[in-house]
Image (cartoon, rainbow, N blue to C red):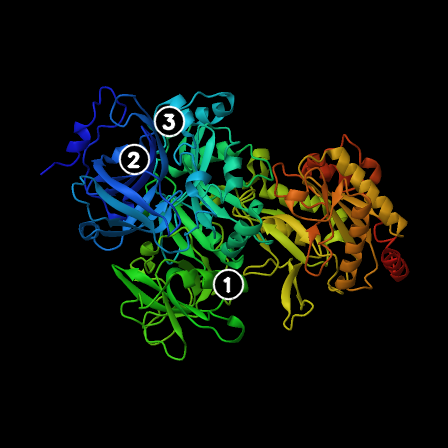
Amino acid sequence: MVAPLEEYHAKRDFTHTPEPAGEVVGERVAPTLRYVVQKHAATALHYDFRLELDGVLLSWAIPKGPSLDTHDKRLAVHVEDHPLDYGDFEGGIPKGEYGGGTVMVWDTGTWEPHGDPHEGLARGDFKFTLHGAKLHGLWVLVHMKPRPGEKRENWLLIKERDEFVRPRDEYDVLAEEPDSAASGRSLDEIAAGGGRAGDPAPDPDPAPSALPRAAVRAAGATAALATIPVPALLDPELATLVDKPPSGAEWVAEAKYDGYRVLIVLENGHARVLTRSHADWTDRFAGLARAAERLPADSAVLDGEAVVFDDTGVSRFALLQAALGTHPERVAFAAFDLLFLGGHDVRDLPLLQRKELLRTVLAGEPADSPLHYADHLAGGGQELFAHACSAGLEGVVCKRADSRYVAGRGREWQKVKCRHSQELVVGGYTEGEGSRGALGALLVGFYDGERLVYAGRVGSGLTDAALASLTAQLRVLERETSPFDPPPHITGHAVHWAEPTLVIEAAFREWTAEGVLRQPVFLGLREDKPAREVVREVVDGAPSGAASAGAAAEPSAGAPTPADTQPPASPDPGPPASARGFGADASVLGVRVTNPAKLLFPESEFTKLSLAEYYAAVAEAMLPHVADRPLTLVRCPIGHGHGCFYQRHPDAGLPADVHTLSHALSGHAEPDTWLTVDSAEGLVALAQMGVLEIHTWQSHVDAPNRPDRVVFDLDPGPGVTWAAICSAAELVRDECTALGFEPFLKSTGSKGLHVVLPIEPVWEFVRIRALSKAIVDRIVARHPESLTGKMAKDVRSNRIFFDYLRNAESASAIAPYSTRNLQGPSCAVPLAWGELVESLDIRSFTPALVAKRVASGTDPWADIDGPSAGVRILRAAENALEA
């Protein structure tokens, strides 16, 4: 019997070839089995298809390469087994040696067999699932009966029907994706450069890497750091689900994001975005890859979440799925860990040291970068959890501050969810009725060993777009028998079974005693999770959301259900243990300020007390524009950066100086409760709450549906100069003046300007919104070279987005004199038109400068309510715009 790798070794002289000699390694657990396809330009170009099994890579040579078309049956010649480390080999084999030519790692990932792989190979019908950068889904290798005298062992590689099938005349994966999945190089580039995937390339500009390399050296003073290439396969560290946040100074807490967990791998200036199952999604997250390639490092691996934030600052999985198809520029990356930097493996460093390195790498990112540093709160899991749940976030992840980065699920990272949610495998569907068309509800389950266990039906939360997409995919996956064990008994509906391939995520109230979901709500399709990895989540050994005996279980404290996102009724937990070192409580205008020395903007040493004192100093000028207006607040309990959230409704522990308004929006039967302030003490109370931005409605509490101001936002696109912004503001002023209004000017504290028209509160928002849109349309039509009324970034290059959308009920604009959640911080400031000059830097208006400006008596908006346009002017403008 031939020993493993004996044939491989016999064919090669390792003193002449750079190929790895390798050895048989121990058997690994099935979900980690490796897969690789190597593009091999030898005597003839072919593709080597390799699957890890029993410590080696089973190998087939495929002359024409794999195809995503089910009609293509590609010849696959079984060749000698290769060592596992051959899967990383990318380089040149000298001419005259066995297999002489150039080798590329064309695709790489993991695979999983369907049933016993040895039995499948023995019977010649070998089915498996691939999770690669380029190849995905269901495949089969079929053994061909040998012809008389034929010595080769011939198989056929065939793509099975699933959602990854593509007709070859529509998409030829070999032509569309010809380059390396490991290094991004072409065959010619590999032939010219030699070496293997991960070998360092000459640094054409070493200066950008100096900062992170110096940071690594500093971190290495307390730990020995390995200098190695980034491995081809990296598994992320995963958190264990628990029922409450851990406490103690040894823990830090981060917001839990609702998106796709991805690693950004930067090598030699080329970035790839990989899912947790090693699929290469660089094309889908191209914006993130481009941003990563601008980082001041030649190599790095960042761990985080690809997300899309809603208009309240909360990440929403459904928005991410929609953005990937229509607005990929909205996708952001919340980076919370660093694995490699500058050629060094930093996974053995303590978490806080890794995060400090990560902060250094991202420190120079511009405000509009999609890459964001995910900040943390030391020891503050309980406090952050309460804030997270009241703001509608997913929950929190608590991590041991001194822990090293370890792949897989462990206790060093613990997650606490604000709501029950569960990944589920779709095994069929019921037919719909009426408007639901062909699909009524999804039949879902989870794996218990080899069994797919039925867990109920998911019908709520399915949008028209989701219904159409799922129907099309499930029709391809239809099968005759139930994949569930045991099959569920479903009456009253026509049932269609499906191959258990699709994975969804659902929120739910609880698990019933029978193991079925109660009140499930569809959240989205999980393309980043293999179906066979979906199991029922447990909390410290008990099923998550399990019903108590004899009664329906209540959600955990502070954990909203899908239908109830109101804030938790728990008392204010008070400051976390780690915050108690920020000095004795202070008092500003009689309002208690806890943790006064807490740094809200560390780069400027701006503290919580600084914010409270600033609002007290500018209150007299600020209140005429803030008092008795419904508010939208940006709260940052951790300080500037991540962990921030929007708040418009009250939560537990609301300060006495912050008031509420009950008001039903137009078309709403039930009123909502909104936040307001009416005093300087109220502004200080907002500082005590960690409010870094105050936004107001354009109306007062006595007439919340009738605005008294119209706000136009001038938001510059790429390539727009400050001089162009000034010119645009002046032409908007002149056009509005010609219509009878008296415009006022405000800097937003960021990069744009607001032009504000005071009006009498006589018309409702719907009419004012139509008027403001008509004004924008007229001005854009007259100045199309510099202005656009379209939000899409692809039409904003060298133009300014002229935005009227703040003129709607419940919409808001940054308040005059509010700080911004930006480095500095900077403030939004009323300006006189004479101050609008090319030398003006609106980001230079810091709290200290603005406080001095107010103290000097400078107030360009002192008489803003005097020239308010009444009904006569409004009607005249409306008529003029209609003419």
Quarter of the image with the C terminus in it: bottom right
Image position of 656 with respect to 512: above or below: above
Q: Identify the element where label 3 is drawn.
A: helix
Q: Which mark is residue 10?
A: none
- Viewer-closest of 309 and 814: 309
Coordinates of residue 864 in the picture (x, y in percent): 83, 50
Looking at the image, is mark 3 or mark 1 earlier in the sequence? 3
Image position of 294 with respect to 795: above or below: above
Quarter of the image with the N terminus in it: top left
What residue would you read off at disc 1? 468
Mark 2 is surrounded, within 10 Å at the Cα level, by few (under 14), some (14 to 19) or many (20 or more) other residues, namely: many
Looking at the image, is mark 2 or mark 1 earlier in the sequence? 2
- Please tell me how many numbered marks the rendered image carries: 3
Which amino acid does the dot numbered 3 rest on? Answer: Gly
Which amino acid does the dot numbered 2 rest on? Answer: Gly
Q: Identify the element where label 2 is drawn.
A: helix
- Viewer-closest of 847 and 527: 527
Q: Identify the element where label 1 is drawn.
A: helix
Coordinates of residue 441 in the picture (x, y in percent): 44, 69
The residues tagged by marks 3 and 2 sit, at their Cα atoms, a distance apart of 31 Å
Which residue shows up at 72% across the image and 42% down it?
800
What residue would you read off at disc 3? 220
Residue 222 visible in the shown view: yes
Q: Which mark is residue 87?
A: 2
